[in-house]
Image (cartoon, rainbow, N blue to C red):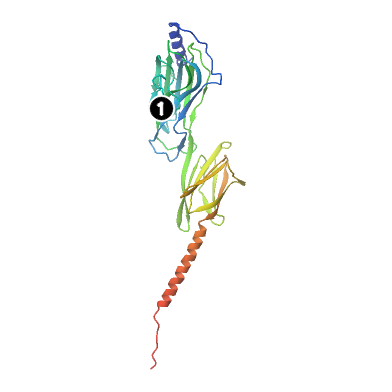
Amino acid sequence: MKMHRATLFILTATILATSICLRQSGFTNAAGQPTVRFISEITELRSDIPINQTFKVALVVEEVSSLYGFDFQLNWTTDYIQYVSHTVTIPVDSYSTPQTPSPYEGILKNPILPVKNVINENKSIPGGAWPDAMAWFAYSSYYPAPSFNGSGTVVVFTFKVIEKPSLGANIYIHIVSSDLANRDAQPITHVKLDLIFSIVDVKEHIITYNELEYVVVTESNSTISTPTFNDTAKTLQFTVAGTDGTVGYCNVSIPMNFMWGEWTVRLGDQQILPPQLQITEDAANTYIHFTYEHSEQDVEISSTEAIPEFSGLMGILLIFALLTIVFVAFARKPKVTTRNL
C-alpha cells in the first residue's frame, strides 16, 4: 500500500489510542455519499483570455458526516495554467466565513494536526506521494476536537493563465487520490469530481459588403467556419463542428446596421426554436445564442431586414446626385451667340 494512504489513518488511530473519549462508529451521509470537488471562479477558458489573468479555485468537501481527517493529492494542466499561491482553510474556527469562490467556511475542528501541505509542480513530492501529484494536503483533528459535519472548504488556490487555450485543449484540475476518515480512523466512502474547463473559441469575422466592413463575432465550443453573407436571402451562413454526441453552443453577435428585424435560425434543415434559441439585443448588436448536438452541420441565420436595402437607397441617391451635377453643369454652360455680318 502507498504510504500516503495509511498516513492519516495511522495518525488518527494513534491519537485516539492515547485519549479518553467516546468513540463514534463511522458512517456516510444518509442523504447520499459526500462529494469532494472543485469550485472555480471561472469554468470556461476563452481563447481571448489575457495572459497572466489570475483566478481562484477552491477544493471542497460537501455533505459529510463525522469527518475527522483527510488526505488529498492533486495535479493540473501546466501547459495552460500555473500555480500562484494557496491558503489552507483549516480549522473552521479560524475560517468561519465563506471562502471565495466557495460558498462554504473552512473545515475540521480544533485542535488540528497538520500532516502534509506541499506544492510542487515538478511532480517530485517526497514522502510517499503518488508520482504525478503536484499538491498534497493531509490534516486531522485530535482529542478533544468534535467531528466535522456538513460542507467545508479545504484549500483555496490562485492560478494564472500562461497560454491562451484553443479548441481541443484538455485543461483540468485532477484529484489524484482522495481519502476521508472518521475519528475511528475508518474511511468515509465519497465521490470525487475533477474540474475540467470548457474551451470557448472567440473569433471576429470581417464581412465586407459594398466596400463597407461589418464585424460579426462568434463565441463557441465548436469549430466555426468563416461566415458568408447572402444579400438576396438576407442570410448569414457558416458551419459548426465538434465531437459527435457532445453538446455544442454558439453565441453570434451581429451589428444592428448590418442585419436586423425578425430572425430565423436553421441548423441543417431544422429550424431552431426556444428554449434552444435565445435572442437579445442592445443599441449596437443582436445577440443570438443556440445549442445543438455536435456533428458537422450548416447554420443559417436569416433576418427580415439587411444592409442591401440601405445600399439600394444609397445607389438611388448617388444616381440622383450625378444627374443633379450634370444638370447644373449644363445649366451653367455659357451660351454661344452669333453675329450677323
- Asked if residue 114 shows in the view, the reply is yes
Residue nearest the observer in this picture, 274 or 43: 274
**Would residue 292 appear left or right of 127 to someone viewing this image?**
right
- Name the residue that disc number 1 marks: 157
Give percent across and percent down for residue 239. 55, 46
Residue nearest the observer in this picture, 154 or 204: 154
Q: In the figure, 93 relative to 45: above or below?
A: above
**Would residue 199 appear left or right of 273 to someone viewing this image?**
left
Query: Residue furthest toward the right?
Result: 269
Q: Secondary structure at mark 1?
A: strand
Give percent across and percent down for residue 311. 49, 60
Question: Going 51% across and 17% down the picture, which residue do you hit?
Answer: 65
Residue nearest the observer in this picture, 278 or 113: 278
Q: In the figure, 96 relative to 161: above or below?
A: above
Give percent across and percent down for residue 272. 59, 44
**Dot 1, crowdedness within 10 Å: few (<14), some or many (≥20)?**
some
